Image: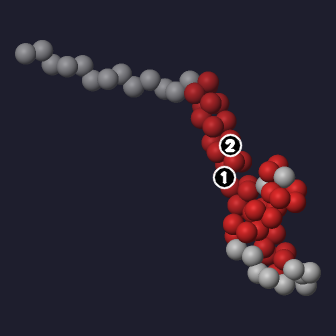
Amino acid sequence: MAASKPAASSKPTLTTHLLAGGAAGLAESLCCHPLDTIKVRMQLRNSRRSADPVPKSFLGVGRRIVQREGVLAL
């Protein structure tokens, strides 16, 4: 019986690192930035007297931002 060769481990190339970093940055921009925007709006809303006294949920604040300012505001 012939012994199988272990798989040769090759180092990732610069292109692989750049693509992985770009994908991570895109995912962070699409997920974390909108959540942070909503969180800050909720914090600011609680710190000042608001004209709209009804407290909004996390999704309600997000929906209101999209309605008033558009999706790119997130």
The residue that mark 2 highlights is 25
Q: Where is residue 47 in the image (x, y as percent from the top left)?
A: 85, 82
- Horizontal side of residue 12 vs 46, given as left or right: left
* Viewer-closest of 52 and 45: 52
* Viewer-closest of 18 and 42: 42
* Viewer-closest of 69 and 5: 69
Seen in the picture, residue 32 relative to 53 is either above or below; the reply is above
User: Tag 2's secondary structure?
Assistant: helix
Q: Looking at the image, how many numbered discs can be counted on the residues?
A: 2
Q: Residue at x 85, y 75 (%)?
A: 44
Q: In the image, what residue type sits under mark 1?
A: Cys
Q: Can residue 19 be seen in this view?
A: yes
* Viewer-closest of 38 and 61: 61
Packing grade of label 1 (10 A; few <14, some 14-19, many >=20) is few
Give residue 51's quadrant in the image. bottom right
Give residue 26's quadrant in the image. top right
Give residue 25's quadrant in the image. top right
Check residue 31 in the rendering and tell me which mark sits there, or answer none.
1
Q: Which residue is drawn at 59% across and 35% down?
A: 20
